[in-house]
Image (cartoon, grey):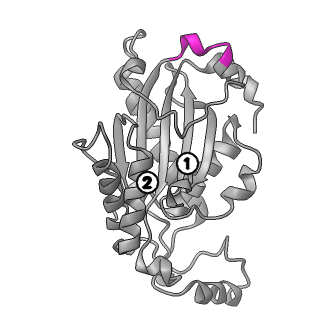
Amino acid sequence: MADATDAGDSCSAFILLTLVRHGETPENKANIIQGQTDTLLSDEGIKQAQLAGNKLNDEVFSHIYSSDLKRARKTAEEIINQNNCCSQMKIVEDSRLRERGYGVAEGVSNQRFKQMAAENNMKTNIFTPKEGETVAELKERATKFLNSIIHEIGTLHCSDSSSSIQNDICVNDKIIDEPQTSKCVTQKQEKMSQLANILAVSHGGLIRQLLLHCMDDLPSKFPPGSKRRISFTSPNTGLSKLKIYFKKETKLPEFVECFYLYNAEHLG
């Protein structure tokens, strides 16, 4: 991972990205692997999504994305219904935000999945069931989603070098403490343009791989202990907040600052 200060001269714009895992499902409760099976939220999952919405109710999102699976879409709807500014915004479904495909293992218990991995002399974190998606393929899908939204937003706004919606996007300062420590922020902030404030509702495996891409493959600044924390799955409706800087010329991520991971304070 490159030193965080190396990115300072590269950054000319940024987006804010809030990642949310879907609410609880009956299968979550029963420790059943869902993968891309299109399951529904439980009553508890709906309540969790509403609580997450209350936590984010002052955010003015410019874009809202969701996995096209029902448990994620419903979570996004409940979050937006609680929002003071964005309750009428369109939710864009994107299949790239789906959970990892587990093939023949979808519908089996976590315990049975461990047995399947052992039967193939593999650890569970690298085991790919028949007809399933590899972890590398999942990470590639997450990376493509991130790069594509940055390119799309950068293309839309960066044709005019003075373009910025900084004054049109507010961030809830009740839950975000943005450390002003990196060169990319402190020395270049006056030249930055905030181009988007994005909400993306997805799944535990996809979110983990997107965060690992940001941490391992890009210059980044994460809170202490993040590597270990990312190795676990986000709790249902856990919130992760990123600030992603990029060059207007390349429209590719150059530096990532993470404010928090898997925040579940709203669940009490």
Residue annotated with mark 1:
240
Q: In this view, does 205 lie to the left or right of 9?
A: left
Which range is magenta?
A: 186-192
Tell me if residue 35 comes above or below residue 53 in the rendering: below
Classify residue 154 as left or right of residue 258: left
Measured as percent of width and height from the top left, residue 62 is found at 34, 34
Q: Which mark is residue 185?
A: none
Distance of mark 2 from mark 1, alpha carbons? 12 Å
Q: Position of residue 133 (x, y in %)?
A: 52, 68
Extreme-front residue of the structure: 268
- Counting residues from the start of the chain, the first of labels 2 and 1 encountered is 2
- Dot 1 falls on a residue whose secondary structure is strand
Residue labelled with disc 2:
52
Above or below 83: residue 209: below
- Amino acid at dot 2: Ala
Q: In percent of the image, x 70 and y 36: which residue is there?
A: 221
Contact (CB < 8 A) between labels 2 and 1? no
